[in-house]
Amino acid sequence: MSDTTATRGAPGDGGAADEHDLMERVVNLCKRRGFIFPSAEIYGGFRSTYDYGPLGVLMLRNVKDRWWRSMVQMRDDVVGIDAAILSSPKIWEASGHLANFTDPLVDCRNCHERWRADKIEGICPNCGSGDLTEPRAFNLMFKTYAGPVEEDATVAYLRPETAQGMFVNFLQVLQTTRKKPPFGIAQVGKSFRNEITPQNFVFRTREFEQMEMEYFVPPDEGQRWFEYWLGERMAWYLDLGIPADRLRLRHHDPDELSHYSAGTADVEFLFPWGWDELEGIANRTDYDLKAHAALSGEKLEYFDQASGERYVPYVIEPAAGATRTMMAFLIAAFDEDEVGGEKRALLRLDPRLAPYQVAVLPLSKNDTLVPVAREVLGLLQPLWSVDFDVTQSIGRRYRRQDEVGTPLCVTVDFESLEDRAVTVRERDTTEQVRVPIDGLVEELRGRLPA
Ligand code: GAP
């Protein structure tokens, strides 16, 4: 049985008001259903920081796991690391972050708000005054002190990107894994930037998660591998359900390129406020390895024993944001339709990203139904992330699961006690089929991609 009518059209075709509305609905849903909460809300919130709730932590983990699976698990040329967040100033001196990782900052002399000079056009967006201070460079790294003494010798930084962890561990990974170029080192983890204007929910925050990979290649193969990773990364987003009309690749103009880059392209998503970056893919040349070699005195190069050749590899870097990407998946999945004449909100999330793949719902709290439902729960829990919900009417529980993107509901009713069968209901179509408990795992395996 299917009884649905779509009401939301193609993305971006609803005008600015619709898109603003979409953003508001997604933010509300995140808070109301336990995906993302403003941090320290009981104290009035804390400076654009966010906490991931019970559903958010499941979904964010799925985003990161999917990235790891495609970038590490399914390949034999990429290995992972998990480097320290607290890091030596030497790393950031070599990488150029101490000198260059800055934003131009201006203050409004009238209302005393602070802005990024490159994001406003000489007018304070708060009060409209043109009386702004001269721009000054503001370093985005969070500085702290390791140990009890606050002096220059104890300065440490919270890493502003995970990438440098791969460069400073290049030799150790090379020696311990015996990999040879082309090969990659991947990492997923938190990064910190003292952003002047954090904005748009979790799009730009001061604490966020990145998923980065540094792919080391012979210098003359740099361009080829750059193009290869552009294709791989676009395919990853499309495979997980970002619609093609909300995704594009934008090549940087030569005057936009970072000082180390021989080519950069951004994977962009059509956010409610317009196209914006999800991931940057760059040909970083041999800049980083050479910079760390110069400051550390270590030879960061590859020696090919077969050919007797010694060289500093070029690096291709696909650098994505996990938290930002999760937000894009939520925006792309949000939808509204009608079921049996009633409006419903749903997340059409790919089952691999949904917080729960299955919800087990006993028709009522009846003492004879709950034990059978718990038996079904026990069958499914080792295989998938499963919710168990006994409160409210079955119709309302279906809506609750639709709203958080659960692709399949399994309902245990009074007939189940007689025929040892359950009803499987599909989120997108609301279609229902009756399945014997004995064959349930197999049925769900067929419907849920690995
Ligand atoms: N190692 C290169 C690098 O860090 P980046 O473009 O600065 O490149 C990569 O960052 C990705 O990290 C971005 O495309 C974005 O998805 C994410 N990201 C960067 N700053 C962020 C912030 N303040 N909040 C959330 N995500 C951020």
Image (cartoon, helix red, strand yellow):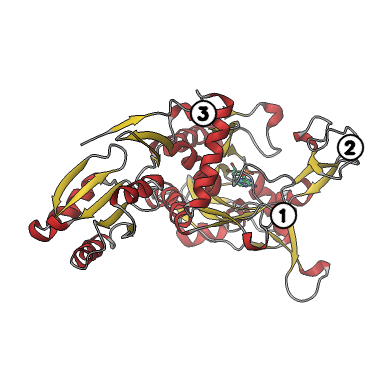
Q: Secondary structure at mark 2?
A: loop
Please tell me whether mark 3 or mark 2 is closer to you in this view: 2
- Mark yes or no: residue 214 visible: no
Q: Which mark is residue 132?
A: 2
Residue 159: x and y, percent?
A: 66, 57
Mark 3 highlights which residue?
248
- Asked whether the residues under the numbered discs 2 and 1 touch, taking CB atoms below 8 Å apart as contact, a structural biologist would say no
Q: Check disc 2: other Cα within 10 Å, few if <14, some if 14-19, many if 20+.
A: many
Seen from the viewer's position, the closer of residues 366 and 140 is: 366
Q: Check disc 1: other Cα within 10 Å, few if <14, some if 14-19, many if 20+.
A: many
| Residue name at image x 27 percent, y 56 percent | 361
Is residue 8 depicted above or below 416 in this figure? Answer: above
Structural distance between the alpha carbons of marks 3 and 2 = 36 Å
Give the side of residue 327 with respect to residue 159, left or right.
left
Q: Secondary structure at mark 3?
A: strand
Give the side of residue 226 with respect to residue 130, left or right.
left
Residue 82: x and y, percent?
A: 53, 61
Disc 1 residue type? Answer: Trp
| Residue name at image x 23 percent, y 53 percent | 411
Q: Secondary structure at mark 1?
A: helix
Mark 3 lies within 8 Å of ligand 1 (Cβ measured)? no
| Residue name at image x 32 percent, y 59 percent | 389
Residue 206: x and y, percent?
A: 67, 52
| Precedes in sequence: disc 1 or disc 3 | 1
Is residue 430 depicted above or below 209 in this figure? Answer: above
Quadrant holding the N terminus: top left
| Ligand 1 image-quadrant field | top right
Q: Residue furthest toward the bottom?
A: 148
Mark 1 highlights which residue?
92
Give the side of residue 433 with respect to residue 139, left or right.
left
Seen from the viewer's position, the closer of residues 164 and 118 is: 118
Seen from the viewer's position, the closer of residues 315 and 72 is: 72
